Amino acid sequence: MRTALLVAKVAESHGVLQPGDWPDVAVSLLLEGNEDPEIAELAGLSRRVNGWDTEPLVAAACERYEVSLPSQEESTDLVARLMADDLRARPAVVTAPMIRLMARFGSADFASDSAHRCFAAEEYLDCDCAEVDLEFEVELQSMPTLGLPAPVVQAIARSLRSTLPTAQPPHGHRDR
């Protein structure tokens, strides 16, 4: 329960998990046998909820399980491990899905080296302009598992996973 809450809070802090996603996460946790009262209440909410509805319940559950947000580097690592778990269960149809996903957390001044590397490489995945280190993609996909049940992983990862192309993009350079 603690790991699931931690990963969900990290995903929320990165803008990957929205208030309306908490009911699905809570339902997946209940189906795995977690009987926390705040989680049960979250599961009963509509997807049209806002943070005013979810935040007190999430905060109470996080306090009970002593969940606090880690550093930027560690939180990026947790999201990467979440997505690696999701991709192991449901492979993507595009090349370098981890680089594509993790690029959303990188920029020139971002605190995570792996997210920055993904950000720098993502632009060149579908063109011949530069060589992309696909061994780094293998390294990302091989990250240690979080050990969460597949339905919990899918519920937390759903929003970020939806940003992946549904088909291999055409080969050629694209402008950002």
Image (cartoon, rainbow, N blue to C red):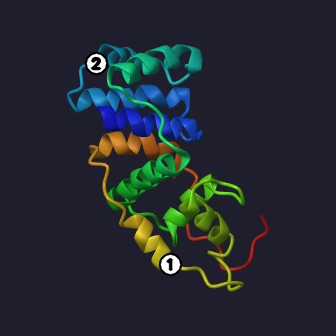
Return the x and y of residue 164 as percentages of the image width and height.
56, 58
Residue sitting at 43 percent across and 54 percent down? 83
Return the x and y of residue 165 as percentages of the image width and height.
58, 61
Which of the pair 17/56 is nearer the observer? 56
Residue underneath mark 1: 134
- Disc 2 or 1, which lies upstream in sequence? 2
Amino acid type, mark 1:
Leu
| Residue 119 figure quarter | bottom right
Q: Residues within 10 Å of mark 1 (few under 14, many from 20)?
A: some
Residue sitting at 55 percent across and 41 percent down? 16
Q: Is 124 situated left or right of 161 in this image? A: right
Q: Is residue 165 visible?
A: no
Q: Is 121 situated left or right of 76 in this image? A: right
| Residue 23 figure quarter | top left
Q: Residue furthest left?
A: 33
Return the x and y of residue 113 as percentages of the image width and height.
57, 62
Return the x and y of residue 135 as percentages of the image width and height.
46, 79
Residue underneath mark 2: 36
Secondary structure, mark 2, is loop
Which of the pair 107/38 is nearer the observer? 107
Residue sitting at 57 percent across and 71 percent down? 168
Q: CA distance from mark 2 to mark 1?
A: 42 Å
Q: Which quadrant does the N terminus fall into?
A: top left
Amino acid type, mark 2:
Asp
